[in-house]
Amino acid sequence: LGGLASTVFIPLSAALIHTLGWRHALLVLAALQLGVCLPIHALQLRGAPRPRAGQGPGATHANAGVAVHLRRAPLWLIAAFVVLMASVTTALPAHMIALLREQALPAAWVIAVPALLGALQVLGRVLLYVGESRFDVHHANRWIPALIPLGLLALLLGWGALAAALLFAALYGMGNGMLTIVKGTAVAQYVSHAHAGTLNGLIALPTALARASAP
């Protein structure tokens, strides 16, 4: 459901900027974070179990298992894919409004196209969930990442055409939504199911740096 955030907040942010100016719009959004998100987060964490120190009898064996995968190519290839894709999917939304304005789309569609992406992400995840028993997951893992560059290509080739912008939204939105599932499960499928949490955690740091630097 996190995919719906852009569907709600891109039009809301645009309306706030139009009404209050961008500085005061940021203050409203910050107030929502502090007044709504922070209390919910604090309440949900109340009574949560403390993390256990990883020094139990199986810790040494587990660390040795992780080290084996660090010396093999599949983990590094998946890490490179995740980091580079995170760069693309973070850089593009930061510039999407300006990009669509340059294509001379009507002002309403400049807001509507990015807002559609969130709903289409959710749709993509639902389709993947419903259809996963009907197709080979390895084939899906190959074609799902291709939807994002195909969406960008449609946007470039159809410069200024609303139909091209909508095709971009469909391909990029559903592709990005399904890609979240692919990235989250690739390590378990192709490297190690037993160490998926630890290995995904190792990939998370360079991924976060890519998301911060790409825009």
Image (cartoon, rainbow, N blue to C red):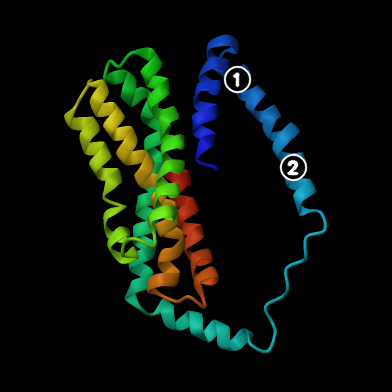
- Spatial distance from mark 2 to mark 1, Cα to Cα? 22 Å
Up-down: is 160 above or below 5? above
Residue at 22% over, 21% down:
161
Up-down: is 56 above or below 183? below
Q: Residue furthest right?
A: 47
Q: Which one is nearer the viewer's eye here, 140 or 52?
A: 140
Q: Quadrant of the N terminus?
A: top right
Residue at 58% over, 16% down:
16
Disc 1 element: helix
Q: Mark 2 highlights which residue?
A: 40
Where is residue 39? Give x, y as percent.
77, 40
Q: Mark 1 highlights which residue?
A: 25
User: Can you tell which quarter of the image residue 183 is in?
Assistant: bottom left
Up-down: is 8 above or below 210? above
Label 2 packing within 10 angstroms: few (<14), some (14-19), many (20+): few
Q: Residue furthest left?
A: 157
Q: Mark 2 or 1, which is nearer the eye?
A: 2
Residue at 27% over, 62% down:
139
User: Can you tell which quarter of the image residue 111 is in?
Assistant: top left
Residue at 26% over, 50% down:
146
